[in-house]
Amino acid sequence: MTRSDPKSVIQNNEAAINPHNQSNERRNFLRGGVKAASLVAVASASPMVQAQESVQKDFPAWSITPGKGFSEYGQPSTFEFNTKRTIAKAYGDLAPGTGSTRTPIEKLEGIITPSGLHFERSHNGSPAIIPKEYVLTIHGLVKQALNFSIENLLRYPLKTRTYFIECAGNSAQNILAPQPVQATAGSLHGLISCSDWTGIPLSILLEEAGLDSKAKWVLAEGADAAAMSRSVPLEKILDDAMIALYQNGERLRPEQGYPARLLLPGWEGNMNVKWLRGLKVTSTPTHTKDETSKYTDPMSNGMARQFTFEMGVKSIITNPSATMKLPIPGLYQISGIAWSGAGRILRVEISSDGGKNWFNATLDGESQPHSLVRFRAPWNWKGSPAFLQSRATDEKGHVQPTRAVYKANNSVDGRYHNNTIVTWAVETDGSVKNAYL
């Protein structure tokens, strides 16, 4: 058997890439991986007797000494200690519970966010609610007010759904900062996470309470010290709203609303009220402080949009992304996530020249409504400057907008609902930076 020339393998892989023929591109991408694997196997081949002698002399310590014992709750490897959330405190140590932590989306794969890495957003910290003392009250324009303990709630039939939650202020830095902030994808866009949520369809509980004919809205009230509360149209409540009790198979964590939270698939994260204590059925929106002083969208004409509940269609390339570096020119896999509050993602397109030309990425599995979907595409970087972008389209025909279009329709302080196309600039040395186009 003759050894392959590494240079010829790379050249063959580069020649196989055709941005105008996606089936060939994917096939050649896989074929290139097989060639590379074969090359490694050939280069490391040696007589079996020599391999046995090497193993006997240089066996690694972890294979000849007893390993760590059992633990009551598993933890990530210590070698993955850098896979963690970034913390943003709005007022520093003056109000340590006001702010957020952001999911390191550039370090994750698939679509499910581990519970310990799901982003947090709180306005006055996470309350330590004692589950035996917890009560959820449904009152207002109902035939009979009802109180539910956790024990009561856990007796209802449960359903599990995979949904994303995105803070309305996600990606705000890319609108507010006059120059691109150089930080990781998670630090810039990590107020997005996706989990398996298990709970009770809220329509079942309202059915038991009985709705008055004047009922049109529901005020969801949180038990936190900030008294977070939002008005929700009754139509949404009866459609797909859920009282979530479990996340990714285990009981909710305190920062995710333990012992119960409201879940409104596809709608802005602030409305998914955590530590839910009350649902008041009303005839009109309540206009609370959290839906008037915040979470409205000021426009360029001086007016403001209110109750823009649905999160727009959006996508982000997570790898490669800002602060990363491509070591050498050659074949790479572009990977990222896409989602829409309107339903399923229909298509994700990739551009390497700042939006002049586009080609379709491949979606991992079947896209589900109000869930993340992972997209992938092969890309041959030839060592010249590039501008990587992704553009998502959902099943209702909504297309992810450019930054220029967004800024034309919003005021300079329009920090909410930024779903614009994200640009990563790849420089000649392989470094990747956040960029505006």
Image (cartoon, rainbow, N blue to C red):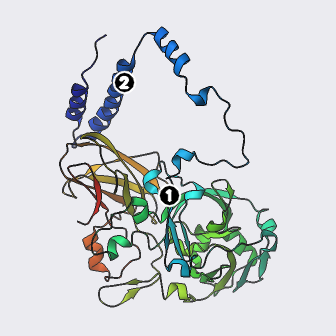
x 35%, y 32%: residue: 30
Q: Nearer the viewer, residue 330 or 272?
A: 330
Q: Amino acid at mark 2?
A: Val
Q: Position of residue 259 (x, y in %)?
A: 71, 67
Provide the residue designation for mark 2.
Answer: 40
Is residue 178 visible from the viewing direction of this image? yes
Residue 306 sits in quarter: bottom left
| Residue at screen point 79% across, 77% down | 147
Residue matched to label 1: 371
Residue at point 57%, 45% (across, down) = 77
The residue at 44%/73% (across/down) is 169
| Residue 64, image x, y percentages | 63, 25
Determine the image quadrant of residue 338.
bottom left
In the visual, does 36 lie left or right of 129? left
- Residue 333, relative to residue 300: is it above or below? above
Q: Pick the quarter of the image with the C terminus.
A: bottom left
Whether residues under marks 2 and 1 lie with C-beta atoms below 8 angstroms apart, the answer is no
Separation of disc 2 and disc 1 at Cα?
Answer: 38 Å
- Please determine whether, in this image, residue 311 is positioned above or below residue 295: above
